[in-house]
Amino acid sequence: MKLDLLLRVATKFILPFMFVFALYVQFHGDFGPGGGFQAGVIAAAMIIFYAIIFGLEAAKGVAPEWVVEKMMPLGVLIYASTGAISFFYGKNFLDYSVFDLHDPAHGQHIGILLIEFGVLVTVCGTMIAIFYAFVGRGSS
Amino acid sequence: MEHLDELLINMVLLTLMAIVVVGIIVMKNLFSAVILSAIYSFLLASVLIVLDAVDVAMTEAAVGAGISTVLMLATLHITKDKEATFTHSIAIPLFVIVVTAGALIFATFDAPEFGSAAGPQHNHVAPYYLSQSINDTTVPNVVTAVLSSYRGFDTFGEVAVIFTAGIGIMLLLKGRPSNREDEQKDLDPQDNIEVKASKRDGEQQV
């Protein structure tokens, strides 16, 4: 599906900024608004936007279906294993203070970054996979 | 009255939201209703920004106005874009709506005054989070500290819910892979459309 030139060129301009904004929201979430969930939906919206303008096949070239479907459980796994690491130090589930034994508060910071990454992976993967499932249904 | 401007903006946005809702109810064309619901989400995101809930506003704009609109348009592409005519009696739905709305409005009488600092939500654990989160976690954004650290287990549950929702939709919409392969082998896309069309005709005749 090829729409007119203006839309395609404008999309190519906007997409990199959307991606950088998603990364900004992800990694700046400790300081400003945002976090894994927001970054995940922005990144997913970027792929969906690309699919609307350039077609589903082009989007599947950027984010292949099998990668997206593996991302859904992978994020939950990252989150759960981050929480489970504290078991080895005799602490409770999701106690991030074990990531920096000398400075527990800094350990919290590291733990938050790790689990936010897990949230990003699951949310982004799920949103794109749902989109592929809906649109694939219409074209078959 | 230093927050009068904020109040005015909220009034305008909430009034516009009410108008959009009426538009969605009146609209018979489902395509227009989907676009109106996207406008509703953007207005809600604006309200949330005025209320300083930027995290929620971002999510509302991306999910409510962006992704769910696209999903509803994808659904309209498969189904019809005209609302089906309602043939049943409206007595029971009307009763349910009136009772639910009445209960909800009655519940708001017990809610603390809008923006009041004396509300119970501001006097339970919130003061501790606001004063101690920077020492406990070194994260300046209190929302992130609460979500990921103090309430980490709840957020884990939320991620699991999103994962479950995704798996559910995969199961419903993608079906068994073996069946799909058979279908694709038997029919090339052109035939498939014709089969669907003839099926639809058959249903209408019955």
Image: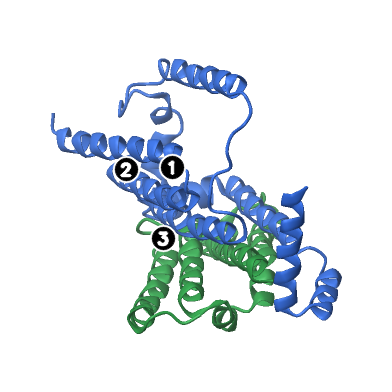
Chain colours: A green, B blue
Residue at image point 52% right, 59% down: B73
Position in image of residue B103 (x %, y %)? 51, 17
Mark identifier at residue B47: 2
Give neighbour class at mark 2: few <14, some 14-19, many 20+ (Cα, 10 Å).
many
Label 3 sits on residue: A29
Side of B122 where A119 appears, left or right: right
- The verdict on a common chain for dots 3 and 2 is no
Which residue lies at the image location 60% right of the left edge and 79% below the top edge?
Answer: A60
Q: Earlier in the sequence, mark 1 or mark 2?
A: 1
Q: Can the viewer see residue A103?
A: no
Secondary element at tag 2: helix
Residue B165 relative to residue B184: left or right: left
Instruction: Give the amino acid at mark 1.
Output: Met
**Helix, strand or loop at mark 3:** loop
- Type of amino acid at the residue the image marks with label 3: Gly
On screen, A125 above or below B159?
A: below
Please name the residue that numbered disc 1 is placed on: B27
The location of residue A104, given as percent across then percent down, is 51, 56
